[in-house]
Image (cartoon, helix red, strand yellow):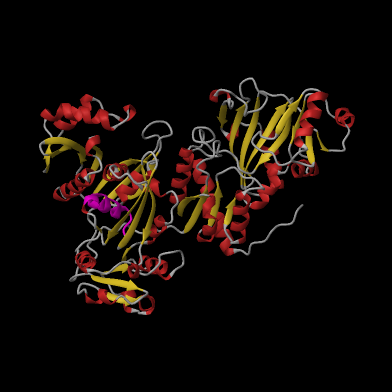
Amino acid sequence: MNRLRRATLDDFPFLIELENDSFEESRRVDKKSIKNSLDSKGQEVWILDCDGVSVASTTLFIYSKSIRIYSIAVKEPFRGHSIGKQMMEHIIQRSKELGSAKITLEADAMNLGLIHWYESFGFRGDYEIADFYGPGRPAFRMFLELTQKPKFKKGKPLNLVVVDQVVPWLETIDSIKVVRAEEYFTNEKFTVEKGIRVFNMCSSYSYQSIGYYVSLLASARNQHVIPNVATIKDFSDSKITELIGEEEDDLMQKSLGSIREKEVVLHVFFGITTAKKYSKLGKSLYRLFQAPLLEFYFEKTDRWNLKRVSPLPIVEVDNDESLFEYARSYFTQRRFTVGRFKDYKYDLAILIDPNEKTPPSNRIALGKFKLAAQKNGFYTEFITKDDFQRLNEFDALFIRTTTNVNDYTYQFARYAYAEGLVVIDDPWSILKCSNKLFFAESMKRESVLTPKSIVISKYTETSSITSQLNFPMVLKEPDSSFSLGVFKVNDCVELEKTLSYLFETSELVIAQEFIKSSFDWRIGVLDNKPLFACKYFMAKNHWQILNWKAKKKRDFEGNVETLCVENVPKNVLSTAVKACSVMGDGFYGVDLKEIDGKVYVIEVNDNPNVDYHHEDIVLGDELYSTIMKSLFRRIESQRSHKRTISKEK
């Protein structure tokens, strides 16, 4: 039996042990702080005992009109048994007893599963606190209002079940009113009548289906709806496991741990799992993905993973006495915990490759992009190359995997643009930046200084090359990027050998003057304005910033030094912006060398790196926000102006 009680000084050893087991060292409070919490009149520490054994605690800061949750901790063996849920329900009840207007807390901004768990109790995001858990480790301030007026003051709420097919047995449930979707759309009374709870039981929730529009319209009418549009979006999220909190994940591992099969399907009908041994897991997952009829699909590798969540059409579920009883009990509930519909104005897809070894943004940076997008009005999903057919569900595409004209990234960009999406990187930028021939000719046309370059074919004489360029010189594939397909040759033997290799895959090769330097400038440019500035130093004992042949990981790339844009020489900035203006107005990274007062553009990259604790050191989260604001402005501009393709200069 579980019992909640106020902590005493006798619990001091347990609280210290729990603190050490639950939090990494940088986030732990010391013994003195724990003792102060036990002694303080302005704090309350609560313990949850399970069969007489202490298994969890929460520390609350009590203010005159609010309560702040300082911590919730559960012993590892007891996680996944709804202990956290019991603690939260107690905190909410205790807050009401004290007459508090709201509850506040800080959550790890990078732990999207934890944020989603708090949202399931009705918490909403307020703002982000930079460096809360240490340098570059922000927290998300969240709150739960407790003084909202009840939605249904007069009598019982109207439970409206919306269907698009005839389901006779639903009509026999007294606590609901069943209507067809067409009537829900057109009947004025469903727009003006107060106290409506909408249960969307249409046969499909896919994008732009009847079911999708039922939930969308219900949210627009400020009606409680299950499932809401945010939940519908979660069904199609290929990164669905990111939404699973620690408690749910632990429960999943324990509940399915004895199963020998590699795949398991779990059904949850009206919040109830038919297999009693999995009832806790079913209820826990239902809280995250609320819909009347659900199917959860799990796969096992070294551990169990939730791979897919699918709503089930009611006409495909066998109707028996149990299903009827589940439904009758479900619809007679007085209260449903329905997540608040997030009023995102646009939908953003971020294209990633989970298997890429050196992606343009690391995992933490991707999380920051997602948080910045959400704050700037985007519902955001990470998508992969398998989601090509879903592109028209979105308003914008942001590519965060290495682009190439000859692979799916260009196809995504081209198709998304054709479907009317705002795209970074746009297909024209990918084409222009990836081709060294275009780069060389366009820079020459605009009088932008570059290392001396010549175009070589199979018929070019070696003597012609050496008469124009001195050794060492650099040879490049026309479509090379990220230091790949780029070679330094020191004499005629290496020249002929390397050319022979390159001509196996390309009819033309670029030969370029070699300019030695200890670092390259990298200027990030967005909307034809400098955004960030870095010095990329050469990899150890190598002539490039990346050494793909390095035997040790630490020797793979050189150091990165990030500077304020204002501290960069003006001629470096102006040259970078001028070079980008030839490519377009997208998001670029310009590599430059500054030698004897002259600035040479080495290349313009359409898919520049933005990594956590590298390019973002100066601007911090503002870097991610600026890029998302640019995407938002582009959509707004596109909506109000006819889109045209500008002619080449």
Question: Can residue 65 be seen by looking at this rendering?
Answer: no
Q: Residue at x 75, y 33 (%)?
A: 501
Magenta residues: mostly which secondary structure? helix
Residue 404 place in picture, x, y as percent: 64, 45
Image spot of residue 194 (x, y percent): 27, 72
**Image coords of residue 16 (percent x, y):** 21, 27
Relative to the observer, which residue lies in front, 31 or 207? 207
**Front-most of 20 and 66?**
20
**Residue 505 is a magenta residue:** no
Q: Quadrant of the N terminus?
A: top left
Q: Is residue 567 left or right of residue 320?
A: right
Residue 427 visible in rendering: yes
Vertically, is 544 above or below 584?
A: above
- Taking the magenta stretch, the answer to whether it contains residue 281 is yes
Identified at 39% across, 31% down, the residue is 134
- Give the residues in magenta: 277-290
Where residue 11 sits in the image (x, y, percent)?
A: 13, 30
